[in-house]
Amino acid sequence: MARVTILGSANAIADTEHENTHLVVVGSERVVLVDCPSNPNLRLERAGVNANAVTDLIVTHFHPDHVSGVSIYLMEMWLMGRSSPLEIFGLDDTLDRLEKMMALYGWGQWPNFYPVSFHRVPAVEFALVLNCPDFKIISSPVKHLIPTIGLRMEFSSGKVFAYSCDTEPCEQVVRLADRADVLFHESSGATKGHSSAAQAGDIATRADVSNLYLIHYPNGSYRTSDLVAEARSRFQGRVSLAEDFTTLEF
């Protein structure tokens, strides 16, 4: 049975209990890391996932709270003797910047480096990212400050998980999350490129999802309201606050 584990739930400002938002999808044949801040190896270990077992990395966009750990992850896997290939997926803008970042580290001169392949995801709705026996992952562009994708995961069990990523309320997320069993929607606040918890509730209602989890939210003194209550004012289904290491089985 496939599962999704939240490795971090915070917005761009993390704290000791909430790392920047990223997650891992574990199936029988593929293990997919979605975004890569901080040091993902430590989070994967705590979640009971072997970092060397990760087959794919999806990078939703090139902001530090989503890509700051990519170089660490790639380097640590190399130093630990990884030999299996890693597939990296993202928009043209994201992968162009990622390759430039890695070039600054001179990774082309790291000896005996394992195979890494870059796969450019079209900036269109419902683009196929990858397909395997346990799940299919598709993406759509969303409305953030830079080119960004949200994701829809359709599991062999028939269950559907959707992830908005960083975005203002937009029709693309409504369509991406259409009748999903679970929608993880960001709730940073109603600012340019982001959404409030209430707006996340609106999206969940319009998409007719069963469960809404709020993610990519402010913590500590930066959280000034009851996010779950805000979302419940707009959505009649189940609302939960995603926490680090929340795990859902599909």
Image (cartoon, rainbow, N blue to C red):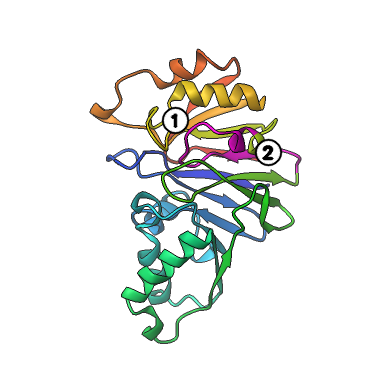
- Find out whether residue 92 is within the magenta segment: no
Residue corresponding to mark 1:
195
Number of disc labels: 2
Q: Is residue 55 above or below residue 208?
A: below
Name which quarter of the figure residue 27 lies in. Answer: bottom right
Label disc, if present, on residue 171 of the rendered structure: none
Residue 13 visible (yes or no): yes
Disc 2 element: strand
Residue extent of the magenta highlight:
157-174
Q: Residue shown at 41%/21% (left/top)?
A: 227
Q: Position of residue 206 (x, y in %)?
A: 63, 23
Residue at (53% x, 39% y) in the render: 164
* Quadrant hosting residue 101: bottom left
Q: How far apart are the two marked residues, 1 and 2, measured between alpha carbons?
A: 22 Å
The extreme top residue here reads 233
| Left or right: residue 216 compared with residue 170 | left
The C terminus appears in which quarter of the rendering? top right
Does residue 209 appear in the picture of this structure?
Answer: no
Precedes in sequence: disc 1 or disc 2: 2
Q: Which residue is mark 2?
A: 160
x, y percent for residue 147: 48, 51
Q: Is residue 82 above or below residue 60?
A: below
Report crowding for label 1: few under 14, some 14 to 19, many 20 or more residues within 10 A (C-alpha). Answer: many
Front residue (pair 40, 125): 125
